[in-house]
Amino acid sequence: MTNCFYSPLLNQLICDKGPSASVLQDIAAAEQLQTLAEKLDEICDRVSGQVDAADKAIGAADIAIRRAHQLGLYHHQLVIGPVAISRLYGPDGPPECVELTQAAVTTDLGCVAVVWCSDDYEEWLDSDELYDAVSKRCVPLCDCGPAVRVRLAREIPGLLRSLLWGVEKSRILT
């Protein structure tokens, strides 16, 4: 688009070709950045609501597990779910490994995250030391980051059902 006007002072026609291609690219990049920032903000809003719900559910489950443990309904049990989160380590982590996270329910700690380096996880799968290797990697779920709590909270109902099934099948109450 070209805009022209006559300048009596200079006694000539002055034409402005409009914004250059690089200016238009800068504007498009800024608009794209704004759109992406708005989408990220929407995701953050959605996750914030999920964090509150997950924290409430995790707290209730932890209380019930501790109470059942105190009553003697079970003794040192661990139920572990599948790998639910797989992500690259940050800049300080080992470059050749991936961080793997599983949800678990343990009678000692309640709802936990089990965090592995992918190499250690592969070794554990091939080993016979189930409980010791896992128990060293347990982090109370309430101590994990918000996004991790939300993701792993989805796994907890099935794990708690397994723990409850074990209590019911133990015949301790019959």
Image (cartoon, grey):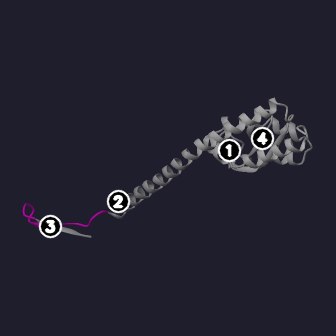
Q: In the rendered structure, are the residues bearing label 2 and label 1 in contact, judged by CB atoms less than 8 Å apart?
A: no
In primary-sequence order, the first of circles 1 and 3 is: 3
| Front position in the image: 124 or 48 | 48
Kindly state the secondary structure of the residue where label 2 is placed.
helix
Looking at numbered disc 3 in the image, what kind of residue is underneath it?
Phe
Residue found farthest to the front: 174
Q: Residues within 10 Å of mark 1 (few under 14, many from 20)?
A: some
Q: Which residue is the site of mark 4?
A: 105
What's the residue at 78%, 37% (across, down)?
137
Q: Is residue 165 magenta?
A: no
Q: Residues within 10 Å of mark 2 (few under 14, many from 20)?
A: few
Looking at numbered disc 1 in the image, what kind of residue is underneath it?
Tyr
| Front position in the image: 137 or 31 | 137
Looking at numbered disc 4 in the image, what kind of residue is underneath it?
Val
Q: Which residue is the site of mark 3?
A: 5
The alpha-carbon separation of the residues under discs 2 and 1 comes to 38 Å
Kindly state the secondary structure of the residue where label 3 is placed.
strand
Where does the image place residue 32, in percent across and percent down from the top left? 44, 58
Residue 88: in sight, yes or no?
no
Q: Which residues are magenta?
A: 7-19
